[in-house]
Amino acid sequence: MKNRKIVSIVIISVIIFVLLLVSGGALFKNSTMYYRSDDYLSQVKEERSVGSMQDEKNVADGKSFDFEQFTGKWTVMEITARKGTEIILQDQSEIREGLFYIIVLDSDYNIIIKREESNENTNITFTIPEDGEYRIRIAGKNATGQFNVTVRASEEISLLHKDFFD
């Protein structure tokens, strides 16, 4: 009788532990900490949703658009450049609500540089480490505002705009 109670308690404890692990993982994936993690920001898979997106403008050296309730990851532009090229992202974005990042990734999805938007309108500067393609990605959670980035380079580059539905 005593052994049955112990076995029952152990089984119930294991079930509770497993349920906490499973629900804890789901809670973490919806947390701000998850959306800020390098693992999330550098994932190959892009999932995104937006309440609305307006006034999208693709120009030769940049991109801008207004958005509401953006959650997820989206590669907005791709750069092809040579090693040693200095890139300046002139960031005039204004985020009114939510969490929002601008990230630059190499072709293997390694983070070259990332910045959480703080509405300071400062430049993001980096040097291309190897010849190749680099992605300018945005990531956010319930973000609302305007994305507005112009790309400047010390040498000739190729800039490709990516549509939201690509």
Image: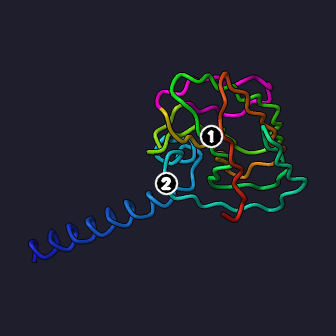
Q: Residue furthest right?
A: 55
Which range of residues does the magenta coloring cover? Answer: 113-130
Q: In this view, does 115 lie above or below 142?
A: above
Viewer-nearest residue: 132 or 69: 132
Give the secondary structure at mark 1.
Answer: strand
Residue sitting at x 20%, y 74%: 8
Q: Name the residue under label 1.
A: 79
Q: Position of residue 144 (x, y in %)?
A: 81, 48
Q: Mark 2 points at which residue?
A: 44
Residue sitting at x 76%, y 23%: 122
**Residue 121 among those drawn in magenta:** yes
**Residue 70 appears left or right of 109:** right
**Residue 63 among those drawn in magenta:** no
Q: Which residue lies furthest to the front in this view?
A: 156
Q: For mark 1, does the 10 Å Cα neighbourhood hold few (<14), some (14 to 19), or many (20 or more) residues?
A: some
Viewer-nearest residue: 17 or 61: 61
Q: Position of residue 33 (x, y in %)?
A: 54, 43
Kind of residue sitting beneath label 2: Val
Q: Give the quarter of the figure containing the C terminus.
A: bottom right
**Residue 53 appears left or right of 164:** right
Q: Position of residue 115 (x, y in %)?
A: 63, 31
Give the secondary structure at mark 2.
Answer: loop
